[in-house]
């Protein structure tokens, strides 16, 4: 099961949202802290200014009345508040400490009792009484909700812009990744548009150039191999005709058998060199397997038995030509190297449709499994003269990769060799026109 966090876009989303959340929370905390400090400094400066103004007023014009809410209270008046407690809120403690630092040394500062208008009581060494001046509330009603709303709006806009930028960066990279996947499977790979940042454009350009060069080399090799195989068919046909005219029956049968083996090898070369996408129409795999097995039994009544275990149903479909080549090569390989019974099975797996062919022979040595599907590799050299070129499983793997599937060769627990082929659900039923153009449904990324 795919997870969104495994994609580049998902990880970019997590990183971007995480950084935005961290930055917005930090800015919110800094703004609140600085706003409290600015408010405290403003209240201190205002209180110092008023105290100095009152002292100048008492010194210069003692007969003039003081402004409202500003007064001078005698030292022994009962209204004088108590000294501040040590458990005051931090803003009030900071306010008192800053105010004492701004006033002359030895000045006593007290706050008005709770419940009354906010004011500060100041008594210096040279003051005749307590100077009472109003101060701004250190905790006035603030529009904190409005601030949070604005932060959420800015955060949402930043997230949308970041997601759009991440998508713009990830989209061309996803197209390149799909092209690499198709190229690795041996499927036709169209030219990838060179978009995105400079490094990504350079990477895409290099990939397109690599695909062109590899395709050209593959075409040259296929043309050469197909030409050689095709040119060998005519002399082989003449050699078979001459062998059938020989009088010695034993020698005639041996030569005909050798010519048939060489013709089979040439046919394998032609199939392996065929590098064009299959344009045949899809057919139900289960029905085609039954048809091939019936034809096989009709042609060779005394051949080893072939059993069927078909559970996929009519939904599983593959191109007819590809399916025929797969089954013919797998059945030939099983009958040549395995032991009866040979079982053809289909089923619906967790990751896609499964087609498997297994026999009950000795299997393959574990060290040779990695080389089983390589071209021109015969694990048993003694069988090289029986018309086997070492291309059977190589052709199977090549056809499977070109069809978008995966091939796995393994030994069965109960003995024998099993070739298990898995086709993704969205690739096993592509229409013929899409296969001819080499198109593929775009991979869905959550």
Image (cartoon, grey):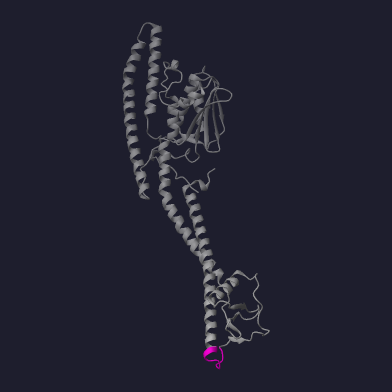
- Residue 182 visible in the displayed image: yes
Which residue is at the front of the view, 178 or 345? Answer: 178
Q: Is residue 328 visible?
A: no
The magenta stretch spans residue 117: no
The residue under the point 39% across, 14% down is 258
Task: Left or right? Give the position of 338 relative to 172.
Answer: right
Q: Position of residue 101 (x, y in %)?
A: 54, 74
Dominant SS of magenta comes to loop
* 60 part of magenta stretch: yes
Q: Is residue 320 above or below residue 107?
A: above
Across and down, in percent, residue 289 comes to 51, 29
Choose between 41 and 31: the one closer to the eye: 41
Q: Residue furthest right?
A: 78
The residue lying furthest to the top in this view is 248
Answer left or right for 233 relative to 36: left
Picture layout, residue 373 above or below residue 124: above
Q: Position of residue 298 (x, y in %)?
A: 50, 21
Horizontal side of 294 relative to 82 (left or right) equals left
Q: Which residues are magenta?
A: 58-66
Rendered location of residue 253, percent (x, y) = 40, 10
């Amino acid at each position: 099961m795919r997870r969104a966090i495994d994609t580049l876009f998902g990880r970019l989303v997590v990183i971007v949202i995480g950084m935005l959340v961290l930055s917005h929370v930090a800015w919110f905390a800094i703004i609140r802290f600085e706003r409290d400090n600015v408010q405290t400094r403003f209240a201190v400066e205002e209180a110092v200014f008023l105290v100095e103004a009152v002292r100048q007023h008492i010194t210069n014009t003692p007969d003039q009345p003081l402004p409202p809410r500003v007064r001078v209270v005698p030292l022994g008046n009962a209204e004088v508040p108590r000294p501040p407690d040590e458990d005051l809120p931090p803003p009030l403690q900071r306010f008192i400490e800053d105010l004492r630092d701004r006033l002359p040394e030895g000045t006593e500062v007290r706050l008005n009792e709770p419940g009354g208008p906010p004011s500060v009581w100041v008594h210096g060494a040279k003051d005749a009484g307590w100077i009472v001046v109003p101060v701004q509330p250190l905790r006035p009603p603030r529009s904190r909700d409005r601030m949070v709303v604005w932060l959420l709006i800015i955060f949402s806009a930043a997230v949308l812009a970041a997601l759009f930028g991440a998508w713009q960066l990830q989209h061309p990279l996803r197209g390149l990744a799909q092209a690499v996947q198709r190229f690795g499977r041996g499927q036709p790979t169209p030219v990838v548009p060179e978009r995105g940042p400079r490094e990504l454009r350079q990477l895409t350009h290099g990939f397109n150039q690599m695909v062109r060069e590899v395709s050209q080399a593959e075409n040259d090799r296929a043309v050469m191999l197909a030409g050689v195989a095709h040119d060998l068919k005519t002399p082989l046909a003449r050699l078979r005709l001459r062998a059938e005219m020989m009088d010695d029956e034993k020698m005639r049968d041996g030569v005909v058998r050798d010519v048939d083996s060489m013709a089979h090898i040439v046919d394998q070369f032609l199939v392996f060199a065929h590098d064009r996408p299959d344009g045949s129409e899809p057919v139900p795999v289960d029905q085609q397997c039954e048809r091939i097995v019936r034809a096989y039994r009709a042609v060779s009544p005394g051949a080893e038995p072939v059993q069927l275990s078909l559970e996929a149903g009519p939904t599983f479909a593959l191109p007819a030509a590809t399916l025929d080549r797969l089954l013919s090569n797998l059945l030939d390989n099983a009958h040549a190297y395995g032991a009866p019974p040979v079982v053809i099975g289909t089923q619906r797996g967790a990751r896609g449709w499964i087609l498997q062919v297994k026999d009950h022979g000795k299997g393959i040595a574990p060290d040779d499994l990695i080389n089983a599907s390589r071209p021109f590799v015969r694990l048993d050299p003694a069988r090289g003269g029986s018309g086997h070129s070492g291309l059977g499983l190589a052709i199977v793997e090549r056809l499977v990769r070109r069809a978008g599937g995966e091939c796995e060769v393994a030994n069965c627990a109960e003995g024998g060799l099993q070739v298990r082929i898995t086709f993704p659900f969205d690739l096993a039923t592509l229409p013929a026109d899409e296969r001819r153009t080499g198109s593929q449904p775009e991979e869905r990324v959550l």
